[in-house]
Image (cartoon, helix red, strand yellow):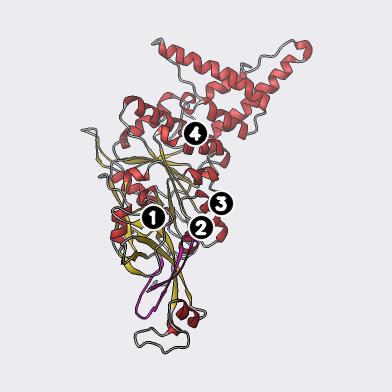
Amino acid sequence: MLVYQIKADLVELVFDPRSEDLRVGESLVLREADSGRALVVQVLGFRTVNYPALIREELGAQPDGPVPPDEPDLKHLKVAQAKVRKLAGRPWDSWDGWIPHREVVVERVGDREVLRHCIADLGNRIYLGRTLQGDPFFVEGQALEKVNVVTGAKGSGKSHLAKVLLLRLIERGAPCIVFDINREYVHLPPLELDLFEERVVRPGIVHLRAGRNLKLGIRQFGLGPLLTMLTRFGLPEASALYFENRVARLLDEARDRERAGQKVPFIGIDQLIQLAEENEYYQGGSSLWGGDRVANVINGAIRSRLEALKNTGLFATHPKEATSVHEHYALIRNGGALVIDIADLSNLAKVGFVQAIIEMIKEICEAETAQGTGRYPFVFFEEAHLYVQKASIDYIVTRARHLGLTSFFVTNMVTGLDEVVLRQADNLFLLSLPYEDDVRHVAKSAIVDQETLLAFVRRLKRHHVLVVGQATGGYPVIVKVDPLSGVNTAGETRYFFRPRVAVG
C-alpha cells in the first residue's frame, strides 16, 4: 500500500485489492520511517486507477521499463480515498496540518485502538452495540449530555436506536422523559414498585397518557402554555390580553394565599369558564357606547375557546383528578422514564400541552440545581418540529448547559431539524440518509465534514449508525446497534393485511 497523493486533508492510497482487503470506515496510520511522526486517516471510499502507467511513473518506476517481479499487476490496482483525522502519538491529537513525505509505512489500526484513543471513560460507560470489526462500543455517559441529534431515513432503525439509548440510560440510573407522538415507547419494560416498602424494584417506564391518566390543573399548566393553546384555537389578540390580565391576577392571589399559609382553592377549567360567564375578563364601560355588547363579545370569545380546551380532556376538573408530574418524576428520579403519550391529542392541543410539560421540566432542573443534587433529566423529543414551538426549541438547546437538561431530538424529517439544534449539537447519531439534500443539511452542524457524511451515511445498512461528536472525541465511528434481545421495541403499527403464509 503506497501513498499516491495528499491534497488538503484528503489522502489517496494505491493498493492491490487481491492482497489488501480495505473497507470503508477503516482506520490507517501513515508513519514516516525516519522521524516516526504519523497521521491517522480513515477510508471514505475507493476508485479504480484510470491511468496505471501514470501511477507507476509517479511512484518512481520507469513507465516503459521492465516490470519488477514483486510489483503488482497494474490492471488490478485501486485507489483508496481517506480523510485525515488525527496526529498519531501518545495520546492522539488534533491534526495541525502536518503531512508526511511519500515514503511512509502504512499500518492498519483496529477499532479497539481507535476507541481507546478517542472515547473517554469516567466510569459511566454505556453500551450501544458493536463496531464493524465486532468490538463492543461504549460511550461515556457524561459525553452524551446536553444536545444530541438522532436522525435517519424511515425504516433505518432510528427509533430502535433511541430506545437503546433510553434503556441504557435507565440502567445507569438516569431519569428520562419521552414525548411519544406515535406510541413507540409504551411497550418497553414498566417500572416495578414495591408498594409495601415504597421503593423501586426494577427501573422502567411510567406511561402517562395525556387526557387519560395525565390531566393538569390551571396552576400546573401555567398561564403561558394556556395562552398558546387559546390563540391556536383562534382567540383574538385583544381578548387574549384581557384573559391574560385577569388570570394573572387570579394566580397571583393564589400564590399570596399559599405564602400566607391559607388554603388555596383549586383552579380548574370550569372556574375559568365561570369567570367568562360572569363577564370577569372584560366588564365593559358605558352602555351608551355599547360597552355591554363589547363585554359580551370578548367574554363570549374567551368562553368558547375555554370550552374547546375543556373538550381536549387535558384539564382536571377537581384536585384528585390532577396529576402531579413532579411526584411521578420522583418515581423515576434514580432510574426510569416518564413516557408522555401525546398520540391522542389534536395538533392544536399538542403544542400548548408540551409547552406546559417543558415548563415543569425547567422547574425540575432548577430545583435540582438549588438542592445541589444534580439529578437532571434526559429528554427525548420524537419529531419535535410537529409539536414544539421554535422558540421553545431554541431555549432548550441554548440554555441546556445552564439548566442541566439533556435533549435527544429524534426524527426522520431531517430538514425539519432547525439549524440552531444542529449548530448546538454535541453528538450526531446518523443512520442511513440516502438523499444528498439531507446530508448537506446535517453537515451544517460542523461536527463532521460533508465528505465523510456523503461517504458513510448514504451506505449504512439498517440498524447501523454513524456516531460522531463529544462521545467519540470527534472521530466518526460506525456501529451496529444492539438488537435488545428479549425486549419488545415495536411501536403500535397497524396493518390491514396479515401474513397468510409462513415467512421463511
Residue 218 at x, y = what percent?
49, 25
Mark 4 / mark 3, whichever is N-terminal = 4
Circles 3, 2 touching at the beta carbon (< 8 Å): no
Per the rendering, the mark at residue 415 is 3
Q: Quadrant of the C terminus?
A: bottom left
Residue beneath disc 1: 475
* Quadrant of the image occupied by residue 281: top right
Q: Residue at x 47, y 28 (%)?
A: 316
Vertical relation: 169 (above or below) 11: above
Numbered disc in front, either 4 or 3:
3
Q: Which residues are magenta?
A: 2-24
Per the rendering, the mark at residue 314 is 4
Mark 2 / mark 4, whichever is N-terminal = 4
298 in the magenta segment: no
Per the rendering, the mark at residue 450 is 2
What is the distance, in whole Å, between disc 1 and disc 4 at their CAs? 45 Å
The local secondary structure at tag 3 comes to helix
Q: Amino acid at mark 1?
A: Tyr
Q: Residue at x 73, y 14 (%)?
A: 291
Q: Is residue 498 visible?
A: yes
Q: Amino acid at mark 4?
A: Leu
Numbered disc in front, either 1 or 4:
1
What is the distance, in whole Å, between disc 4 and disc 3 at their CAs? 31 Å
